[in-house]
Image (cartoon, rainbow, N blue to C red):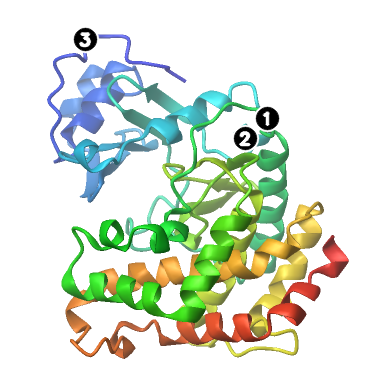
Amino acid sequence: MTLAPQRDVLALARVDDGSLATRALSACGWLEKGDLQDPRLRVETLSRFHVVSRVTAPDGRMAIVKYPAKGAASGGRNLARELYVYRLARWKPGIASALPRPILLDEARQILAVEYLGHAGSEWPLHFAPYPITLPAVAARLGMAMAKWHGDTTEVSLLPSLSAGILHLGNDTETATADRAAGSARFMRFLADDTVFSQLLAEAQHLYRPSCLIHGDIRGDNWVLQDDELKLIDWEMSGLGDPAWDIAGTLAEMVLQAIRDGIGAEPGMSGWPRTVETLAPIFLNAYRQTDTCDRLVPFTAARLLHVASEWVDAAAPLVNEDSDFTETGVMPILTTVRILCEKRTQATDWFTPWT
């Protein structure tokens, strides 16, 4: 691993077409100079808040290179937390075992390069999530990996995680709706004005207890199975947080995957969707240590509402002036949250075997 480029990269242009990726890999020695002119060299790039490129070397090796897109810094988006996690992994095995192998860490220029863990022949990034949480082996390995990085970081100095932002919705609705499309802003105001949802978020904020490194964005396209181990990517929302937030994120992903798959999120006897009743024991038996049951209902509900806001963001033009969000696909999420709130006591008691 190279901690920073060893050759002259100060003159590298901060461009968003992915060309910086190959030049950075050349500067740190992963690519040879001649590789840059080789017709077999392939670069596939996407850009939103960050530029992410999959680089295939002429000899078939593959890497992912990530750096902030133009204007990302002014919007508060950077790789400081993610790069710090990779630094920590040098002496924290619980983190290292959950990360892909780093190639280049350059905090000064905000460049991260790691080995690519997906299938070489896959279309990228459209088919980068072949291991959903609904696979029991994935649920178990995620539980084991999460327990390791949580347990290994309880006394580490960390920047606060950015992932719990929706918990502060009731504190400043104007900020939460700023710079959003009209439909997205309408949804955030809808959450803030709904008594059940607003009280839930306020309670979750009150219960939030930062104590260790959390990933903060547990979702199916943020992990890959490699050599029977689960590796997690996209740690940009990570930092000091409540371990229950990651656990709840896992429970929420079980619900969301069932909705994506068309199975639905019908509640079982516990008040939790049946998919959670099936998969959560597998995950929690692997995680093994938790005193978080008092926080799992409000945190899972809050995570579901956060993802619902993302879905509305993606489909904001479909939101009409009457605040009917049906066309955005979020209604099963909102229904699940209401049921969890209605059956709060039994849904909380369901976790007793793991306390």
Residues at marks 1 and 2, CA–CA distance in whole angstroms: 5 Å
Report if residue 131 is visible in the image.
no
User: x, y (%) of residue 330?
Assistant: 39, 81
Residue 95 marker: 2
Q: Which residue is mark 3?
A: 8
- Give the number of callouts: 3
For the residues bearing labels 3 and 2, Cβ distance under 8 angstroms = no
Name the front one of labels 1 and 3. 1
As drawn, 39 above or below 184: above
Corner quadrant of residue 317 = bottom left
Left or right of 178? Residue 311 is right
User: x, y (%) of residue 201?
Assistant: 51, 66
Q: Residue at x 30, y 25 (%)?
A: 25
For the residues bearing labels 1 and 2, Cβ distance under 8 angstroms = yes
User: x, y (%) of residue 300?
Assistant: 58, 67
Question: Mark 2 belongs to which amino acid?
Answer: Ile
Residues at marks 3 and 2, CA–CA distance in whole angstroms: 31 Å
Left or right of 196? Residue 152 is right
Q: Which residue is mark 1?
A: 93
